[in-house]
Amino acid sequence: MLLPSIDARATGPVATVRVAFDRGGITDIRVHGLADKATGREVTADDPVRIASISKLVTTLGVMRLAEAGKLDLDADASDLLGWRLRNPAYPQTPITLRLLLSHRSSLTDAAGYWQTPLGGELRDILRDPRAWDTKHAPGRYFRYTNLNFPLVAQIMERATGERFDQLMQRLVLQPLGIDACFNWALCSDATAARAVVLYDADGKPVKDDNHGRKPDCPVMPASDGSCDLSQWHAGENGALFSPQGGLRISAEGLARIGQLLLDDGRIDGKRLLTASSIQAMATPAWQYRPGNGLTWEEDTGDAAAGFFCRYGLAMQTLATRVPGCRDDPFGDGVARVGHSGSAYGLQAGLWVDREGGTGVVWFATGMPDEREGGKSAFSAVEEALAH
């Protein structure tokens, strides 16, 4: 049994999954608990789960493939990539680039929302709300973890290719890696959707993907009239539709293959998907915390665990930052692992790789509180136990 001391608590996780791996493959699997309490179905490492913000890292693999193909320029003005002017109203002369969006230095905030643009709507409408902007800090000068960055990234990807984001990610990343996964369920097989991990809150109430063994009737936010005709999709209008910031459904085993790709500098199974320089660009911190240059927590979740973010690259966080105020080492060993965390709808998750040591781990726990509680670091006690 995994984590007996934690599972014995009345408020413990509904399910925990931990998969360890190295460059050669999976080295250890530990699972405990239920994927679906209503049916008593036990969780497995092959069950798809909404992996929350780890989706951002996977999305960025797609961005880097397009950049390598010459379809995207990370340092071009995003206005040119979007087809309309993207500017912080307080800094109208300062361009916002794809690199700034990927590294959460765009000066955008989540205060105006980021996911609620319906089918047939335009994401651009959110950018017209003054609350969407941090008017105290110019683009490139301040780190603020902001989900809204990634619907804009997805919209740029769609406009560059003419392909729907979820289909594009299948072509660029998931299919080449042999991973049965999808953004917002539309492209997952019925058999995969039937194994969905239900997400529960800390009280054990189902809050996401309680789909009773089938795909949801509508995989996206329906149109304003309640309809769900995906033919209404148009490239480059609504990058939020398939939740690039958090909507990837993937198993822990599938996520371990993403980790293997990171460990082997863009190669897996002897085949190259990305250049080593692209992986290095993602992993290299574009921002490191010092007092006054950014927020070290995510505002949107309400989990104000100061010191959680202290180094961040292109959708990749670096752990174990030795700076006063940083509490970003759930492993407790000082190793500068890279990867990403996820937290939403009662799930806490992580994908972390030690590129120098050649090892990695994926974990997730369901039935967790919104706040990361009980840990010695800014991570939760449950995550710290899974780290070991």
Image (spheres, helix red, strand yellow):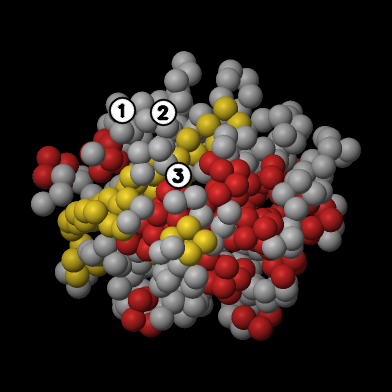
Circles 2 and 1 in contact, beta carbons < 8 Å: yes
Q: Label 1: how many residues lie within 10 Å, few (<14), some (14-19) or many (20+)?
A: few
Q: What residue type is disc 2 on?
A: Ala
CA distance separating discs 1 and 3: 16 Å
Residue tagged 3: 339
- Residue at 49% over, 50% down: 265
Of residue 20 and residue 291, the one placed in the foreground of this image is 20
Q: What residue type is disc 3 on?
A: Gly
For marks 3 and 2, the one nearer the N-term is 2
Would you say residue 192 is visible in this rendering?
yes
In this image, 347 relative to 83: left or right?
left
Quadrant in the picture for residue 312: top right
Residue tagged 2: 320
For marks 1 and 3, the one nearer the N-term is 1
- Residue at 84% over, 56% down: 80
Vertical relation: 269 (above or below) 264 = below
Would you say residue 314 is visible in this rendering?
no
Q: What residue type is disc 1 on?
A: Asp
Q: Name the outermost residue toward the top.
A: 324
- Residue at 62% over, 60% down: 65
Q: Label 2: how many residues lie within 10 Å, few (<14), some (14-19) or many (20+)?
A: many
